[in-house]
Image (tube, rainbow, N blue to C red):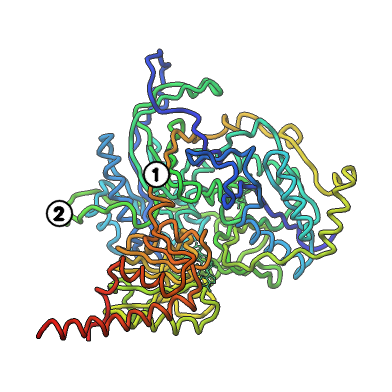
Amino acid sequence: MSGYNIFVLVKQVPDQGSKAGINPDGTIDRAKAKRMLNPFDRYALQAALHTKKAYGGTVTAISMGPPPAVEILMEALEHGVDRGFLLSDRRLAASDTLATAYALYKTVLYAGKFDLIFCGLQTTDGDTAQVGPQLAERLNLPQITYCEDFAIENGRVQARRIIEGGIQRVSTGTPVLVTVANSYHPLEYKSFRGAWRVQQLARRQEELKQFIQTIDLDMIGADIERCGLKGSPTIVAATEKVGEIGGSCTMHEGHSPEEMVLEIIKNTGIREYLVAK
Amino acid sequence: MSEETKPQQAPETAPEPTPDVSQFCPKGDVLVVAEHILGELQPVTLELLGAGRILADKMERKLLCIVMGHEIGDIPQKMIEYGADKVYVADHEELKCYRTLPYRRALVDFLESLPEPPHTTLLGSTTTGRDLAPRIAAHFDTGLTADCTELDIGPYEHKSKVDPTKIGLYPNCLYAIRPSFGESLKARILGPWKNPQMATTRPGVMIPNKPDAGRKGEIIKVPVNLKDEDVRLVVEETIREVSKGIKLSDADVIVAGGYGLGTADGFELIKKLAACFENSAVGASRKVVDLGWIPYANQVGQTGKTVRPKLYIACGISGAIQHRVGMSKSNIIIAINKDPDAAIFKFAHHGIVGDCYQIIPEMIKQLQENKVKREVQAVVGTH
Ligand SMILES: Cc1cc2nc3c(=O)[nH]c(=O)nc-3n(C[C@H](O)[C@H](O)[C@H](O)COP(=O)(O)OP(=O)(O)OC[C@H]3O[C@@H](n4cnc5c(N)ncnc54)[C@H](O)[C@@H]3O)c2cc1C
Ligand SMILES: Nc1ncnc2c1ncn2[C@@H]1O[C@H](COP(=O)(O)O)[C@@H](O)[C@H]1O
């Protein structure tokens, strides 16, 4: 196959928009929570698919997570990804970003040759933006983080990234790892054909396995000591619910604009700041 | 930060015999990695020195600082004035502008050259700090906590038997405290087993020390030896927009518009509302700046301006964390958004769920009437 070998890393996260599975102490019961594709990874997926469309190649989606995470790989297939790998293993439980990046590194090597790796900016549950750069370190790759525009000209990557107070234009050869910002183009709708094809596949599990492979730590030859809790240099020692969040805002809803604005003007003292005549 | 945010261990101590963990009790100092953009010092560095000083004093260690760059002028001296005891300077042409790999090389080499790894290493939670810190942490297989809003030093007893080599009582651990799950939880992350223990801190949160021009410290040059592979990526251009005219940071009232306005024309309405107030200015989210609806100078947030007006009215802005960090310290925040679940309502003080195009004109109308009423009252009052 010609063109670029494009990898995209996607994670399934709890849907925090729905209240299901949110414990009273604010932690998440992952078994009960609704699941979704990490919203930031949609931009990474778009970057990967756009690159394939514009410059040719194949897109491989990679995810690490419990078995239900296969859902997001199916979703990725519907959008036009060519194949997926799900690394799923109980020994990965309680991995921090370093252990996650190690396991993903072994998975990337297992998945074969690559020219470009796209990651999301961050996850909504881990929320660290660390896994991408840590994976790049393991693979000894240059990286373009906070990327909001991406093109390939004469075999060279040209990208625009966000920095404090502005932007930066950078260029590099391949391979390179890119983390895609949420100011990149939103993920296009899946095509009817793509969705239909995956629906058909879902009925034929054997055939589906040709497209989505579930793998474990033994298959990728990972060092168990570097995975899961053991391989994680950090632990969460305590969590505390932050009181002020979601409660201190006086909401005005469901009334006429006149009434709501009047309430605001009465209660906030904003009159004080009006232009004096 | 652990991907699993369930506590695995409570930090309370128990009177069990504890194995010797002295091998894990580092003697190292606290290191701050300074950040500048083309020689312009970033405020987060001064904040880090403030926070780092407290940690170092608690453990009776030194506060170190490393400045990487090229021809960086008086930055090292400034680091001492703000609290550093020793400042290391890595000066190299290729370090003039931040780039991951050359900076990574310089920092890794520097850390490896120290007789003892630092106990703690701190960077800013900026696009630079969050680009560099994970590379360093991965290289040294050490723990890193992103975007901390509090730091402290304290004891920790690890009792979990999953990994027996980790059991023990650790006297001086970095407590890296950060919001998680959409800011609804605060998590305390620890990693006393490996050094340096690393964290990035959210800009605008930590408090810098008052500069002391008489403070004494050491400035030490360190060698920089880059490899060819470190310059694989080229920075073609760095565009930093300097704001002209608008003084967002001095305004008493900021009316800000976001993508919810739908079109660039929406800013006409924003300007009209702003004009109702004395000493007011127009703010914006990055998204609309990117779309060219309004100049960059109006952008509020992590990569725009940090503002603290008496009144902030956010119109059609979702309240993304990068916007929030730039305006959450405003005295009164009023949000107008048609989505009742928008994140902005989690930290605004007053919220209106509604369409900007209905609410804002109504607000302008009422404020203008109000003004008239007040004037009438004032006139009546003088008689
Ligand atoms: C490294 C980095 C740095 C960044 N720096 C910044 C920064 O400095 N500042 C910043 O702002 N962002 C920054 N961002 C971007 C940030 O993540 C968000 O994407 C951005 O703030 C979203 O802008 P918004 O709220 O205008 O748009 P959206 O998130 O699209 O929100 C639009 C809102 O308008 C509401 N709405 C729609 N129609 C109406 C209507 N008719 N009436 C009322 N409400 C309506 C919607 O419900 C929605 O909540 C940064 C991102 C990254 C990755
Ligand atoms: N378990 C995972 N499986 C696949 N990709 C992941 C996983 N965790 C993190 N990533 C990737 O790394 C990015 C940053 O994640 P994080 O460091 O958790 O904020 C995500 O947007 C994904 O692209």
Whether residue B380 sits left or right of residue B114 in the image: it is left
Q: Amino acid at mark 1?
A: Thr
- State the residue in front, A124 or B234: A124
Which residue bears the numbered disc 2?
Answer: B214
- Say which label, 1 or 2, has the lower sequence index: 1
**Above or below B142: residue B169:** above
Which disc is residue B121 wearing? 1
Alpha carbons under labels 1 and 2: distance apart: 26 Å
> Which chain does tag 1 point to?
B
Instruction: Determine the secondary structure under disc 2.
Output: loop
Asked if residue A178 shows in the view, the reply is yes
The C terminus of chain A is located in which quarter?
bottom left
Residue A144 lies, in percent from the top left, at: 57, 60
Residue A15 lies, in percent from the top left, at: 61, 49
Q: Amino acid at mark 2?
A: Gly
The residue lying at 69 percent from left, 46 percent from top is A63
